[in-house]
Image (cartoon, rainbow, N blue to C red):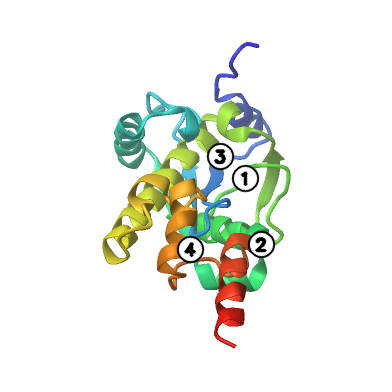
């Protein structure tokens, strides 16, 4: 099957409908057991499109870092974060949407239209928006947002790994790798683990039962 290549077609279609400030929005960190969810909103100037934009999952860390440098130099960028506490309180879907709304709000000026990765539009977005399934592979703006969100979140997890060694967050980014789950069982749950996620909840439940 041919690989989908991100283009500027969705942005141009929005410009044809008289939108000018068109932001691509994506998040990183729905699946991990630890750490926040991070979202980014990126507005690309059609005359200054960065090179090397693609779905962040298809790029090496080196290529993501190079792309991030271009994005921050050429584009308007907003970043939003939802904390572990908010994830546990709201659930991961709504926390992701909260981070997306915060990313859009962090732009230098309001967006006219938002291209959201996925099949849902965050309910608290206050501007025109459309959901784009597999948007990070289809839209250059969403691809840029995916790169920003991924690199910013990875940096947070590397920092947290220094504070809580042994969980491998500098390499697994908090995702439920075998080594991460083993560390959870051996070292216990940190304040940065999502207690509403089953593997973490089960370890806390077992520890509670063992102490009673």
Q: Residue at x 45, y 69 (%)?
A: 188
Question: Is label 3 in a helix, a strand or a loop?
Answer: loop
Residue lying at the far bottom of the rendered structure: 212
Q: CA distance from mark 2 to mark 1?
A: 20 Å
Question: Is label 4 in a helix, a strand or a loop?
Answer: helix
Q: CA distance from mark 2 to mark 3?
A: 28 Å
Q: Quadrant of residue 25?
A: top right
Q: CA distance from mark 4 to mark 2?
A: 28 Å
Give the total number of marks visible in the rendering.
4
Residue of label 1: 113
Q: Earlier in the sequence, mark 2 or mark 1?
A: 2
Left or right placement of residue 156 versus residue 113 in this view: left
Residue of label 4: 185
Give the percent coordinates (x, y) of residue 88.
Answer: 60, 70
Q: CA distance from mark 1 to mark 4?
A: 45 Å
Q: CA distance from mark 4 to mark 3?
A: 51 Å
CB within 8 Å, label 4 to label 2: no
Compared with residue 26, is residue 211 higher up or lower down, i.e. above or below?
below
Q: Earlier in the sequence, mark 3 or mark 1?
A: 3
Give the percent coordinates (x, y) of residue 133.
Answer: 69, 35
Compared with residue 142, is residue 29 higher up or lower down, i.e. above or below?
below
The answer to whether one can see residue 121 in this image is yes
Q: Earlier in the sequence, mark 1 or mark 4?
A: 1
Residue of label 2: 94
Q: Nearer the viewer, residue 187 or 211?
A: 211
Question: Is label 2 in a helix, a strand or a loop?
Answer: helix
Crowd band around label 4 with a 10 angstrom C-alpha radius: few (<14), some (14–19), many (20+)? some
């Amino acid at each position: 099957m041919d690989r989908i290549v991100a283009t500027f077609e969705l942005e141009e279609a929005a410009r044809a409908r008289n939108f000018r400030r068109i932001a691509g929005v994506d998040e990183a960190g729905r699946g991990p057991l630890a750490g926040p969810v991070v979202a980014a909103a990126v507005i690309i100037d059609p005359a200054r499109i960065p090179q090397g934009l693609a779905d962040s999952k298809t790029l090496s860390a080196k290529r993501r870092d190079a792309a991030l440098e271009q994005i921050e130099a050429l584009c308007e960028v907003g970043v939003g974060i939802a904390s572990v506490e908010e994830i546990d309180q709201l659930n991961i879907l709504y926390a992701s949407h909260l981070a997306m709304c915060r990313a859009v709000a962090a732009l230098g000026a309001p967006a006219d239209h938002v291209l959201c990765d996925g099949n849902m539009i965050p309910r608290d977005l206050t501007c025109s928006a459309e959901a784009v399934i597999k948007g990070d592979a289809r839209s250059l703006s969403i691809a840029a947002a995916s790169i920003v969100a991924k690199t910013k979140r990875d940096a947070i997890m590397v920092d947290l790994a220094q504070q809580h060694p042994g969980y491998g967050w500098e390499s697994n980014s908090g995702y439920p790798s075998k080594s991460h789950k083993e560390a959870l069982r051996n070292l216990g749950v940190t304040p940065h683990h999502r207690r509403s996620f089953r593997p973490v909840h089960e370890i806390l439940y077992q520890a509670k039962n063992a102490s009673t």
